[in-house]
Image (cartoon, rainbow, N blue to C red):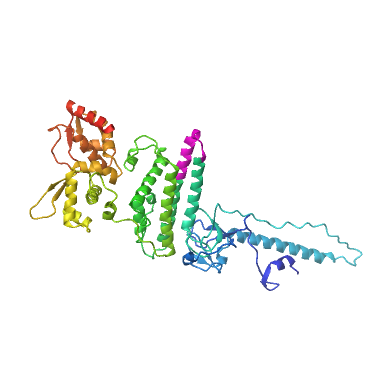
Amino acid sequence: MKMKRLEKMRVGGTSNKMQLSIPSPKTPDGRVYRYSPNVDAHPRHFVLGDRVASFVTDPDKVGRMKHAPGTPGTVCPYSGVRADDAEFVHPDDRKAAIKVVEHAALQDMQDAISGMLAGVARGSKSLTYKPAPRRNQPRPRFGRRDLMRLLVCDCCGRDYGVFAIALFCPDCGAPNLALHFAREVELVGQQVELAEALGKDRQELAYRLLGNAHEDVLTAFEATLKVAYAHRIENRPSGAGQVKPAGNDFQNIDKGRKRFGEFSFDPFAELNAQELAVLSLNIQKRHLIGHNLGVVDAKFVQHAKEAKLGETVELVAADVRSFAALCRKVVRRIDDMLAGLPLPSPAVQDEEDAMISPTETIGDLSSEGTAVGKWICMTSADGLPGHVDKDSLVKAFPSLSTDQLAEATADLAEDGYVSLTHLISERLPRVHVREDLFLTFDPHCMGSDPVGDALQLIPLILSKDSVDVPALHAESGMPLRRFNPAVGLILSKIGEGRVSGTWVQGYPTPYFFVVDSDRVAIKRLARQLEG
């Protein structure tokens, strides 16, 4: 029996036991479906095109490749698992191939049977046979769609498509995380351009577009960090134990650092102190835009000293672009880590160097005095006056001599930020922090403003004759570190004898009383603070 249709598909075997090859259906742009053999590589499905003919590999990126491009084998873009090309055939393509073979075999059998019956009545006077007209069934056709996230590997030039975020190029195996995030940044940039093109009469819509773009940056950033972290978790040595789900840890720099710290890796290491502050502020802005329609709340005020409670947070195109650029810098470092490349040295300055800057001083203070004042401010857990631990101070500034530290503390004392007690047997005096230090340094170091916080507390205090300080703290909703400098500023206006001298953990006093003269003094303070 001749099987002319099947013979066209034959690549080996015998006429009785053929080996057939069926080309996979292609998407409109010429890509084929692929399906990872790794059952844990969700969502497994991706599409694979050809290598871009005009692509020239950058010699600097050859080291990122895990396999020579174009060699047999495919890499799962979601997990990095490599296997034979045949193992990546999509289940839908297998079904399609079977239908193609079934159709061809059926047509060949129908042709063969018609051929055998065609001469059955030849020469017979009693039998006649006239075959009825037979219409061939059309060959089965299969539709395939391109995925939305289409990329070209920037290492080997292979064209492919995935769902959202993947980790590796399916051809050369190079980590492509930074490539994915660059596409997200590109889309965000287009949103920003749309917002900028709107006229003044459509500012509300422009703000909404910018807000959406800003949210998209953090959404993509969080998803990218989650994918990279999950990959490292899945590739830990066996028996490493269970890991608590990440949840929204990657919306927080400290929590994100702790997660990747499990692998002795810091994705934020190349950001300096100022960049980290900008990144943290923008993360908080995203929460405000996404959950509070952009209206500034008490929590956000502590991150942005210029923000005012109840107002709409300021958002301009430059904010979105700088936010995206910082996130992109972090993602590039993760990409290099996945590639096993040497990582650049951390750009974050150590605590002393970050605070000592010849170009950044506060008031008339020297750079050393400013640095010590910042250190005191930043290491205070409760924002209360008190003694500074001498050993911790010396350890924090190893490059300063004892004489230089003594002069720095004297510099602070000259402006009333600390008081000093000199001991005959020691060169370095005992340092006692005064409230003015927090009032001056907090806006520079903590991103909060005790003056603004005091203005929020004043209406709460004026409504009372007796003020329970811990209860006032709870009513204010402020973190303790912000509350104490603010309430300390107000306590300075309360008359002598009306502030309790009883010690209480975490607060300057447990309670105080307010009489008419105190109310007058507090109201004058409010007018002074409001300018």
Question: Magenta segment, which residues?
Answer: 197-214
Quarter of the picture holding the N terminus: bottom right
Q: Where is residue 319 in the image (x, y as percent from the top left)?
A: 42, 45
Q: Position of residue 217 (x, y in %)?
A: 44, 48
**Viewer-nearest residue: 110 or 392:** 392
Q: Residue most toward the top?
A: 516
Residue at (23, 51) in percent of width and height: 368
Relative placement, left or right, of 314 versus 8 is: left
Q: Is residue 176 visible?
A: yes
Relative placement, left or right, of 468 versus 193 is: left
**Viewer-nearest residue: 524 or 25:** 524
Relative placement, left or right, of 263 versus 433 is: right
Q: Which quadrant holds residue 446?
A: top left
Q: Can residue 165 be seen in this view?
A: no
Magenta span contains residue 199: yes
Residue at (29, 45) in percent of width and height: 444
- Report the predominant secondary structure element of the magenta stretch: helix
Q: Where is residue 158 in the image (x, y as percent from the top left)?
A: 55, 61
Q: Which quadrant holds residue 495?
A: top left
